[in-house]
Image (cartoon, grey):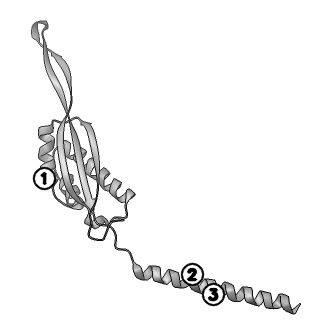
Amino acid sequence: MAENNEYIFTHAIAKGVQSAPRKTNVVAALVRARSVDDALVILDHTPRRSALAVKKTIMSAKANLLDKHRIDPKTIVITRIMVTAGTRIRRYIPASRGRALPYEKVSSNIFVEVAGLPKAEKVAKTAITESKTDEKAAITEKKAAKADEKKGEK
C-alpha cells in the first residue's frame, strides 16, 4: 500500500462525445487542476452542452478511485484532463438543384485522471480490537479450565 503522503492515481475515458473537441476543450480548461468537488460545482453552472459530458467523465474517474482504493474523498484532485478528436462521420445535406453538400459530424474523446491521498489508518482502533480479542481468548481459556476441573471432579 502507499504511504500517507503518496498520491494514488486513476482515470476515466469518454469516447465519442457528440461535441467538437475545440468546444469541449473550452469547458475542460475551466476545471483543469482543481479539486473534484469544485469542478463539479463549476460544471453545474456552465451553460455549455459539453459540460455534462465532462462532468460525467470526472464523476466516473472519482468513482473508480473510491471503489478501487481507500481514498479520502476531500483530497481528490484532477491531475490531467485532455480532450482529443474522436471519429468523424461524413454526411450529406440536400441542396438546391439536386446537389448534395458534404459535412462532417465530429466527436470528442475526454480523458480525465484524478489523484487522491489514502485515508489515515487509525492505529488506536486496531489496538483496541487486539486487546478485545486477547480478553476474549483469556475468557475462553478460563471457561475451558473450569470445564476440565468439573470433568476431573466427576
Q: Quadrant of residue 23?
A: top left
Q: What residue sits 19% from the left and 52% below the top? A: 80
Is residue 119 depicted above or below 124 in this figure? above
Q: Amino acid at mark 1?
A: Leu
Label 2, on which residue?
A: 133
Drawn side of residue 93 relative to residue 68, left or right: left
Q: Secondary structure at mark 3?
A: helix
Crowd rating for badge 2 (residues with CA inside 10 Å; few <14, some 14–19, many 20+): few
Residue hosting label 1: 30
User: What's under tag 2, amino acid-wise?
Assistant: Thr
Q: Is residue 73 above or below residue 57?
A: below
Q: Which mark is residue 138?
A: 3
Q: Quadrant of residue 48?
A: top left
Of residue 19 and residue 129, the one placed in the foreground of this image is 129
Tell me the quarter of the image containing the C terminus. bottom right
- Pointer 2 or 3: first along the chain: 2
Contact between marks 3 and 1 (CB within 8 A): the answer is: no
Question: Whole-Å distance between the Cαs marked 2 and 1?
Answer: 52 Å
Please say if the residues under marks 2 and 3 sit with CB atoms less than 8 Å apart. Answer: no
The residues bearing labels 3 and 1 have C-alpha atoms spaced at a distance of 61 Å
